[in-house]
Amino acid sequence: MANLWMLPVPLSHPRQNSQRTNGVDYICCDCLARMCRRTKELKARTVWLGHPEKCEEKYPKNAIKNQKYNFFTFVPGVLYQQFKFFLNLYFLVVACSQFVPSLKIGYLYTYWAPLGFVMAVTMVREAVDEVRRYQRDKEMNSQLYSKLTFSPHLFLFLSHYNVLLQNQRIPADMIFLRTSEKTGSCFIRTDQLDGETDWKLKVAVICTQRLPALGDLFSINAYVYAQKPQLDIHSFEGNFTRVGLLDLELNRLTKALFLAQVVLSIVMVALQGFVGPWFRNLFRFIVLFSYIIPISLRVNLDMGKSAYGWMIMKDENIPGTVVRTSTIPEELGRLVYLLTDKTGTLTQNEMIFKRLHLGTVSYGTDTMDEIQSHIGQSYAQPQPAQAPKAAAPKVRRSVSSRIHEAVKAIALCHNVTPVYESRANGETESTAAEADQDFSDDNRTYQASSPDEVALVRWTESVGLTLVNRDLTSLQLKTPAGQVLTYYILQIFPFTSESKRMGIIIREETTGDITFYMKGADVAMASIVQYNDWLEEECGNMAREGLRTLVVAKKSLSEEQYTDFENRYNQAKLSIHDRALKVSAVVESLEREMELLCLTGVEDQLQADVRPTLELLRNAGIKIWMLTGDKLETATCIAKSSHLVSRSQDIHVFRSVSNRGEAHLELNAFRRKHDCALVISGDSLEVCLRYYEHEFVELACQCPAVVCCRCSPTQKAQIVHLLKQHTANRTCAIGDGGNDVSMIQAADCGIGIEGKEGKQASLAADFSITQFKHIGRLLMVHGRNSYKRSAALGQFVMHRGMIISTMQAVFSSIFYFASVPLYQGFLMVGYSTIYTMFPVFSLVLDQDVKPEMALLYPELYKDLTKGRSLSFKTFLIWVLISIYQGGILMYGALVLFESEFVHVVAISFTALILTELLMVALNIRTWHWLMVLAEFFSLGCYIASLAFLNEYFDLGFITTPAFLWKVSVITVVSCLPLYIIKYLKRKFSPPSYSKLSS
């Protein structure tokens, strides 16, 4: 086990809250903070090792806090979030108007009780979320770490020495002082910062690593000078809280209802003849008709979304799914564009060696035993460099020698380090050093910055040449015969995205030969290796098979050549100006006329059930865009093998363009193609967007699938923005790495996969899944149900308000347009809560088809993208239904009442409650036992409350048969025609789902 002794230092970048917050909240809190205290100036600081008392300034402890509010900001923060919506702000104004005597209509609690209930539910929900965030923070802050100190502390502070064990998370920004490894090296991962799971080599501070004993750390007199906190690659990016399209549509309908309410009030005042204080009467009518806009709309929808999120996370068919943004589950049911990463999303990010090409001969998975035989023969000789037996044919000897050189180069040219898990038993440094020579451990694992490199080293092990040990200065290989060969590392040139290659200079211990090995992408290596006539063609062939290719080359150096290079290289590294350019120029002086050894092909396997999932999404009308950094040939092959592009579709490869004229010609050629998938590189895409943005997006949106290769993270986000800007359709982005975060957050709906590239994508997304195949059920079942249920729930809540407002309008018009309320007090409060709330909310359990049917017929999903479940057409239908039922209920009660006005209230209100319960039953497509319970519970509550409503009802009248038959007649007349219309429509023009149900 590698023990690390580290020193916490002030943050090199400001620690930021990882919780997704609302942009307005952030600005408000920032302004408040500036008002309450002066902004603290960030300065460089000096940290004394092991002596926190010498620190000149106090710095925060390393506790994590992700909460949105504190004790003082919770109530004002939640209230602001609610009243920024038109609906709640409107009801606040109406409720406040009741404090004005001339505008007062009924009791105060008639308006304040529903508003208070909505606010209470919202605050309870926010409080639950805050408690959960607090509990997650507490769990993180309670993790135990070992510390070297003379006095105990609960948290880690500046200048404390801390001991970290193998596979333990680093709790703060630290300086690496010492390790139990004799070389002073260790590997760390930064997956919690940038999503990268590769192991990065770090070296301890030399002076503290060389101390004789651990206790000597307290005797040294040293300090660390740390730069001031500054933003870098790990800087925080604020995000606005997402608002779904359904919320925006309902907000527009709410404004339409408000306009109708104002018009109706003006009509009432006009029919009065604008007599007297008509402005006051106008406002009284506005208050009187305020139930047209239902105050419970938002709380019902928010509670419904929470229910949908709970259903998603409890679905056993998609285990591990997490809903991180509970405000947009219905967005999953309206997607048209799905933008996906390739590596780790469609593929497993598990590399398997598939092909070795030597120019004249190629070896695949079925002929690897031949390579193993050649390697065994090569190292069976006393001197591997000598020629093989004379009896062997010349061609045979040539191929064997080339295989030996290629495999040796692959085994040496890398950044892989073998790790032996058996050392994790708490040995001392000396025993660990002795164990370094025991290379027979079966628990050997490899750590590297790239899965491709691990795949190559594992392959060399499988053919007989095993990497058994590596440190900063040497590495050792074990031959098939068990002999351990040592190679000294003279220089190493790591892989970068700019160079697209890595190199290493080694000296063989036995012969003293110096060799420069290099491997990299074909585009980078083509100009470095000696002339050949096969590399470009074979790279294309492997790419078409979906393989990731690497070109391997070598160059032998004499002692004089290396000494000259080393001098120039060291001098370049000491340069003050243009150091990087000078170092690069010196290295490039070696990269000339290198001997081409081989071409390797590694396969990134597809995720489980990727093909049927993509086919399911395509049949659902979702257009899939694959955005990847891979080369064009590899991306095209993966698109075919994964069935991203169907077998019947052609593929148009957009030629490489560099200027406006070339882009114009290629766009014209693309315009003549029909129903074909588009494949385009990032460079060509940038040129097209610079000169012909609108034309390109218009043509690309007509394609059933688009593949963008060599695509940067910035371009991924840019493509999402373009689709949102040029189309009115909803977009979804899915990825698994830190480079996908910008794309995920730019889309209307972001889905992250917890993969080998870390958790950053899943933490930044709205929904987190464990496998790509889960997206099918997430969209087809949960997305579809969430949207249809929310649409039905929203329209029914609005119907509940419109029907009672219609009754009020009829009542006022009959009684000389008086602004007198029809129902007062508890009747209005009970109507919107206990009498109708549970049946209406039970609509969140309704479903038109079973989940299996929705997955079997993904074509059902297409209807949702048109937004027909919640449109102005369906809204107007509900308006007409409300006007009809409200008119029937009010006129029926006025016609059938006997002598007292209180009978009108009793008959009409009872018929109203029964009508609402029957309308819920009319709209339910699949009954659930909770729906039945909600119906009977609400009816029972109303019947039981009649005994206490003597202030509003004549208890003697409501127990007579006359009351019962009059209520029954009015209820039947208001509901029966709608049942008949629904039956006829279902019989002669059935919806698509009803055909499947039958």
Image (tube, rainbow, N blue to C red):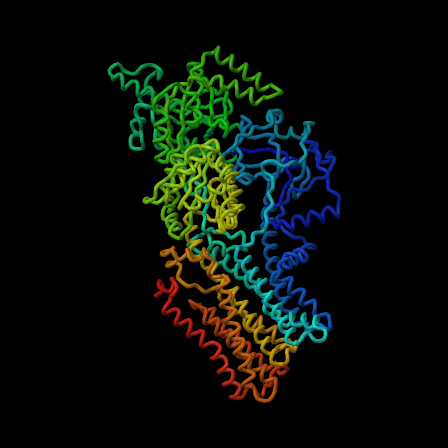
Residue positioned 61% across, 85% down in the render: 901
The residue lying toward the viewer, choosing from 644 and 563, is 644
Residue 467 showing in the rendered view:
no
Question: In the picture provided, is 904 more to the left or to the right than 513?
Answer: right
Q: Position of residue 438 (x, y in %)?
A: 44, 28
The part of the image, by quadrant, that contains residue 706 is top left
Compared with residue 858, is residue 588 higher up or lower down, i.e. above or below?
above
**Residue 597: quadrant of the picture:** top left
Q: Give the x, y percent position of residue 415.
A: 47, 28
The answer to whether residue 270 is above or below residue 32 is: below
Which residue, as the protein is rendered here, is positioned at the far front?
273
Residue 72 vs residue 516: left or right?
right
Residue 388 in view, yes or no: yes
Residue at the spot x=70%, y=32% of the render? 46
**Residue at 64 percent of width and 63 percent of height:** 90
Where is residue 77 drawn, in percent x and y?
66, 55
**Vertical placement of 336 versus 707: above or below?**
below
- For the C terminus, which image quadrant? bottom left
Number of callouts: 0
